[in-house]
Amino acid sequence: MNYNLKNYDFQPAYDLVAASQKILIVGHISPDGDTLGSSLGLSLGLKRLGKQTAVVFQDAVPRHLSFLPGAGEILRPDELAAAGFADADLLILVDCATLERTGNGWIDDYVPRLPLLIFDHHALRDDIPSVSLVDPHLAATAELIYWFLQFCQVPLELDLARCLYAAICTDTGGFRFTNTKVHTLQIAAELLAQGINMEEMRVQLFESRSLGHIRMLGLALSGMQKTDDNKLVWCSIDAATKERYHALPEDVDGIAGETMQLEGVKIGVFFDERAEQGTVKVSMRGRDGYNVGKLAAEFGGGGHYAASGCTIKGSLAEVQPRVLAAAKRLLQETEARL
């Protein structure tokens, strides 16, 4: 289906924004291109409407995304009072399927005290009063933000376009993933027409990585394992390796996608052990027909049909066999249907 702004009722969201002056725009932990680009683009658009906005993330912005307009002005939760936003009158969650995804509980100081507006392309998992604009069929939350700002009659300009384009480009893998639809390309074309520097986008989004990331990627791939038929591929980075190389959290971002490079693979899994939290972050990727969203849900996670994840308590040695067993079951169930 080809979507446009007429598919959504933006009026309740507009009414909330119109009735507010100080607005908190909040993204998820371990920020990626969509939550950052969508949040920053929304902030720029709302400022054009005369609103005061604060973009809030608990975690630091990855270095390769720090070029996005407004990234240097992002606040941490403990900076809101000093920035004059203790009396904010609207809370907007961007690309957050659950309040838990905003961080360590700081959001509880604002929910349910403030009216809540949610933009997302993940199915909601919290039963909280809100005005919600959610569509799991979309490639990126930025598509909703683009249409909402159109509804608000906010004119496009270069910085806003750069933010939204980066969000859409990252969540479609550079327009390679099957979530790329006709309307996705139409939106991208409108954004590009504002004068976006494609060289900057390509380098920053896909080629600008730290030496730490390159080392972690090499170590993970050198230890890659697979089933005999290549259909299930997995790799991992343990906590001791990250400590040895002084790796940052962002240095392991994106490794999950590399598990899909092997010929014949259907499901790829990356395990990131986080000993300081006593957990393992598991990132999953799947070919068309192989629903890794269902796999992640078995362990309390979520995401999309072809890209999902979860965080599981335990060590790498404890978590990995459980996830791989579930992945093999998913393979068998899927193959039996196809």
Image (cartoon, rainbow, N blue to C red):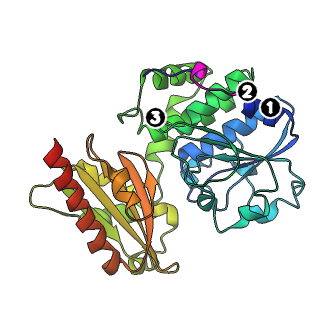
Lower sequence index among marks 2 and 3: 2
**Circle 1 Cα neighbour tier, 10 Å, few/some/many (<14 / 14–19 / ≥20):** few
Label drawn at residue 15: 1
Give the quarter of the image for residue 103: bottom right
Residue 86 screen position, x and y as percent:
88, 58
Q: Is residue 251 magenta?
A: no
| Towards the viewer: 289 or 279 | 289
Q: What element does badge 2 sit on?
A: helix
**Circle 3 Cα neighbour tier, 10 Å, few/some/many (<14 / 14–19 / ≥20):** some
The N terminus - image quarter: top left
Q: Which residue is mark 2?
A: 11
Answer yes or no: do the residues labelled 1 and 2 have beta carbons within 8 Å?
yes
Disc 3 marks a residue whose amino acid type is His
**Which portion, as a residue range, is magenta?**
5-10
How far separated are the C-alphas under marks 1 and 3?
Answer: 25 Å
Q: Which residue is mark 3?
A: 137
Q: Is residue 6 magenta?
A: yes
| Residue at image point 60% right, 62% down | 100
- Tell whether 233 sits left or right of 9: left
Q: What element does badge 3 sit on?
A: loop
| Towards the viewer: 69 or 80 | 80
| Towards the viewer: 133 or 217 | 133
Residue 50 screen position, x and y as percent:
87, 32
Camera sees residue 115 = yes
Q: Is residue 180 above or below residue 90?
A: above
Lower sequence index among marks 1 and 3: 1
